[in-house]
Image (cartoon, grey):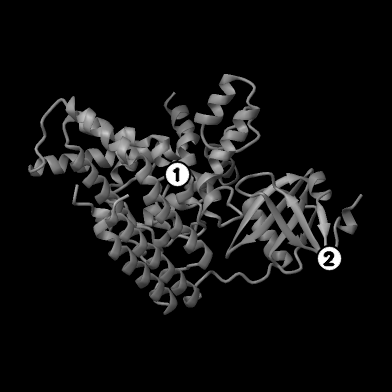
């Protein structure tokens, strides 16, 4: 690494800092109002087209949802002003850790290690069996 | 080499991002920026310059060695030579880009560029950290073997990269029809970054969209189907390390459970989403599912490679 590169790199770091501050100030992220059931169902339909849902449980903070579709749990969680979605076995979702109102679903991927959803109760009372 | 188009263009990149943010803030153009997403994109861009240093020496050495065994002497001062390198470099870019989407080993190096759920000028700078290791630079060596000086090839690659910066925006709708017909544009490249099944693995062009038209991978942006950006399975993290290495880690996990050399080869060089039992979904599978559910819409879209083969048979 020569001096010119280091100077250029340092200037780039400063520019990155300045741009990120500008973005934070501008507040032009996509609006992401808390999910309600209709919006959660629409998102799930977009991510998992054609899947019949037997139940949808929306996070109390509206930042995600989990749905049951046969033997699968369809999980969506907010990431910034977007969402990520994964399908895991329902039994796995059912046995996920639930403490202090937070459900931690292991998604088992480096790209998506886990989803954390705030829920009033888990397992859901109407489908716990 | 003193002339580096990317270095020269860097101030322009910064000013253009500021302008896009300002227009978005003022409501004068479509431009969404999320703070952590932007930080990740710009950090990836910074990191790529450092990563490039690690393999840059090998790339230069290989290019010079190949050039010593060149077929022809192509003068760097001739206009025809620049026209030729423009076309051949852009053709090389098309195939580099296509391989980078259609084979998992190279997708692992390229996926980071598509990992943002945003499409703005900062996304253009979300560059690879592992492209050098993945060896895609080998694809450009034939140009030096033909006789194009390595510096000429490097400059043209830089020009291509600079060109592709401005097309990463939603602020520009469509360019004049003649321009859309010949060149890669924001509209064409929005399709490329979209995760809608009908848009997957389309529009690989660098500068000239004609390659996609020629090789059957062109898909126009459709007013009735807005682009949803990101990858089929979006990340749940903004951590640049996860962005840079998650697919490599996924390959490693899969290789550990491969039960035969054929499975290992499939995990490495099959299309992204390939699995021995078909339990995962490739782009072609996703598009086929979408086409089955939307036959009328699918009739107007570019067919999958499999469908093209079938129709020729």
Query: In this rendering, would B93 be left or right of B113?
Result: left
Label 1 resides on the chain identified as B
Query: In this rendering, would A56 be left or right of B252?
Result: right
Q: Nearer the viewer, residue B137 or B295?
A: B137
Q: Residue furthest front?
A: A3
Q: Position of residue B32 (x, y in %)?
A: 47, 68
Residue A113 vertical position relative to residue A22 in the rendered view, above or below: above
The local secondary structure at tag 2 comes to loop
Disc number for residue A120? 2
Taking the spot 58% from the left edge, 51% from the top edge, the residue there is B234
Q: Residue furthest right?
A: A129
Residue B30 seen by the camera: no
Marks 1 and 2 sit apart, C-alpha to C-alpha, by 40 Å
Residue B29 seen by the camera: yes
Q: Position of residue B139 (x, y in %)?
A: 32, 33
Residue that numbered label 1 is attached to? B110
């Amino acid at each position: 690494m020569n001096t010119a590169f280091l100077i250029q790199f340092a200037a780039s770091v400063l520019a990155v800092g300045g741009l990120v501050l500008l973005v934070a100030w501008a507040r032009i992220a996509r609006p992401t109002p808390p999910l309600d059931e209709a919006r959660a169902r629409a998102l799930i339909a977009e991510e998992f087209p054609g899947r019949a849902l037997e139940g949808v449980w929306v996070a109390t903070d509206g930042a995600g949802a989990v749905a049951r579709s046969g033997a699968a749990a369809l999980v969506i969680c907010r990431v910034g002003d977007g969402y990520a979605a994964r399908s895991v076995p329902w039994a796995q979702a059912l046995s996920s850790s639930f403490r202090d109102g937070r459900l931690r679903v292991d998604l088992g991927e480096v790209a998506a290690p886990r989803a954390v959803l705030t829920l009033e109760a888990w397992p859901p009372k109407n489908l716990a069996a | 080499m003193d002339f580096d188009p990317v270095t020269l263009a860097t101030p322009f990149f910064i000013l253009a991002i500021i302008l896009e943010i300002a227009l978005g803030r003022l409501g004068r153009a479509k431009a969404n920026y999320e703070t952590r997403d932007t930080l990740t994109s710009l950090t990836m861009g910074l990191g790529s310059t450092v990563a490039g240093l690690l393999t840059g020496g090998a790339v230069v050495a290989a290019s010079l060695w190949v050039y010593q065994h060149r077929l022809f002497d192509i003068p760097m001062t001739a206009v025809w030579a620049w026209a030729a390198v423009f076309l051949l470099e852009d053709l090389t870019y098309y195939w580099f880009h296509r391989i980078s989407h259609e084979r998992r080993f190279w997708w692992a190096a390229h996926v980071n560029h598509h990992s943002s759920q945003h499409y703005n000028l900062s996304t253009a700078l979300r560059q690879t950290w592992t492209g050098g290791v993945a060896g895609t630079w080998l694809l450009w060596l034939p140009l030096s073997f033909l006789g194009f000086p390595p510096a000429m090839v490097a400059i043209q690659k830089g020009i291509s990269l600079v060109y592709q910066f401005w097309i990463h925006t939603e602020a520009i709708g469509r360019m004049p029809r003649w321009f859309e017909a010949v060149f890669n544009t924001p509209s064409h490249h929005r399709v490329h970054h979209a995760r809608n099944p009908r848009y997957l693995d389309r529009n690989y062009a660098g500068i000239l969209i004609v390659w996609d038209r020629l090789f059957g991978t062109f898909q126009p942006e459709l007013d009735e189907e807005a682009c949803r950006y990101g990858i089929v399975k979006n990340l749940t993290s903004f951590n640049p390390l996860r962005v840079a290495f998650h697919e490599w880690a996924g390959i490693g996990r899969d290789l550990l459970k491969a039960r035969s050399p054929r499975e290992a080869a499939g995990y490495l060089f099959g299309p992204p989403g390939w699995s021995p039992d078909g339990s995962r979904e490739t782009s072609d599978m996703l598009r086929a599912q979408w086409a089955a559910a939307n036959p009328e819409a699918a009739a107007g879209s570019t067919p999958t490679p499999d469908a093209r083969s079938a129709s020729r048979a």
